[in-house]
């Protein structure tokens, strides 16, 4: 059975359904575990799609309410943490705020509040050189994030393609430093079905990057990045078909920031 470790709550201001709804759906479709991983608070209000620092106690309450409603079903406590230059110390502080099961690292912002997945910024990247610059910034930060070794796995790797924007030609030079960083740090890469629900209509990461990760023995974990309870586990069969076709036979589970390698399920999900 698979898990889904990348899910959100209404506290991030752009998701629907309480943790108990996500957990009940995960249980109903046969997932072995679910993790709650809302966007990390920042020291001060940073944007309009993450919980405030003052929301953390309520976040913990919501997770405990879900655990009480489904006794015996593993519900992991986590955060999705933005890697932003200058905030590494804050991430270290955040890591000590609770007994997390895992922390997810992600890159959204490339500079000055400009996020690669925010529709309001798409018009910035019109020309080939614009797109190359955006991709260069994104992957530089992604490698930097991995090398901090602050996170248990790394989310939606090629999020920069969210709107179908990609440089022309061979993309391996963008992927190679990131794969090497994962090898050097024993890092784990997320395979996310969220891209299938976005403009690009593709799983994150691209098959070519996943093939490189497999060749380098980089572990993976399959997630949905759910913002609705019904997103949990969605399109996991497509993800399973992809990772198996590349050669993967195992995935990873987390508890108290410890990893455990487990086999991928032999059969497709219901």
Image: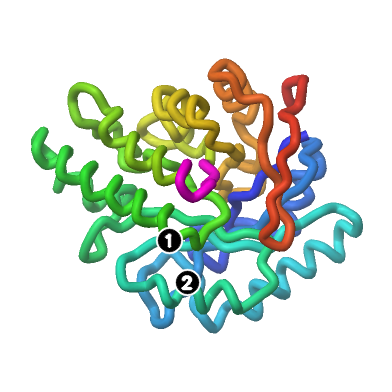
Q: Which residue lies at the image location 26% right of the left edge and 64% below the top edge? A: 113
State which tag comes first along the sequence, 1 or 2: 2
Label placed on residue 91: 2
In the image, residue 109 sits, relative to residue 253, either above or below, namely: below
Of the two numbered discs 1 and 2 in the rendering, the one whose residue sits closer to the viewer: 1
Residue 162's x, y, as percent? 35, 39
Q: Secondary structure at mark 2?
A: helix
In the image, residue 10 sits, relative to residue 187, either above or below, namely: below
Q: Residue furthest front?
A: 184
Q: Residue furthest top?
A: 245
Label placed on residue 148: 1
Residue 229's x, y, as percent? 66, 48
Residue in front for this viewpoint, 139 or 20 = 139
Q: Quadrant of the C terminus?
A: top right
Residue 119 in view (yes/no)? no
Q: Which residue lies at the image location 72% right of the left edge and 50% below the top edge? A: 34
Could you say which quadrant of the image residue 198 lies in? top left
**Residues drawn in magenta:** 183-189
Could you say which quadrant of the image residue 86 lies in? bottom left
Residue 96's x, y, as percent? 60, 77
Q: CA distance from mark 1 to mark 2?
A: 10 Å
Q: Are marks 1 and 2 in contact (CB under 8 Å)?
A: yes
Residue in front for this viewpoint, 176 or 68 = 176
Q: Which residue lies at the image location 48% right of the left edge and 47% below the top edge? A: 155
């Amino acid at each position: 059975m698979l898990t889904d470790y990348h899910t959100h709550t209404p506290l991030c201001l752009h998701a629907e359904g309480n943790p108990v709804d996500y957990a009940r759906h995960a249980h109903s479709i046969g997932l072995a575990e679910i993790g709650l991983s809302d966007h990390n608070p920042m020291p001060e209000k940073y944007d309009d799609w993450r919980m405030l620092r003052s929301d953390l106690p309520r976040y913990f309450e919501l997770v405990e309410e879900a655990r009480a409603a489904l006794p015996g079903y593993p519900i992991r406590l986590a955060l999705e943490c933005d890697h932003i230059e200058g905030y590494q110390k804050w991430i270290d502080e955040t890591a000590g705020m609770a007994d997390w099961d895992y922390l997810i690292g992600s890159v959204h912002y490339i500079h000055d509040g400009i996020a690669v997945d925010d529709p309001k910024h798409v018009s910035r990247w019109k020309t080939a050189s614009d797109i190359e610059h955006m991709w260069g910034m994104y992957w530089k930060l992604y490698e930097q994030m991995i090398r901090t070794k602050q996170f248990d796995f790394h989310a939606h790797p090629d999020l920069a393609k969210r709107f179908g924007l990609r440089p022309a030609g061979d993309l391996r030079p963008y992927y190679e430093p990131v794969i090497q960083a994962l090898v050097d740090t024993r890092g784990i890469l997320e395979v996310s079905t969220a891209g299938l629900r976005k403009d690009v209509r593709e799983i994150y990461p691209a098959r070519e990057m996943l093939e490189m990760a497999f060749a380098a023995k980089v572990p993976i974990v399959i997630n949905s990045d759910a913002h609705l309870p019904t997103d949990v586990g969605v399109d996991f069969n497509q993800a399973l078909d992809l990772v198996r076709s590349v050669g993967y036979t195992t995935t990873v589970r987390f508890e108290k920031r410890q990893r455990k390698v487990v086999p991928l399920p032999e059969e497709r999900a219901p």
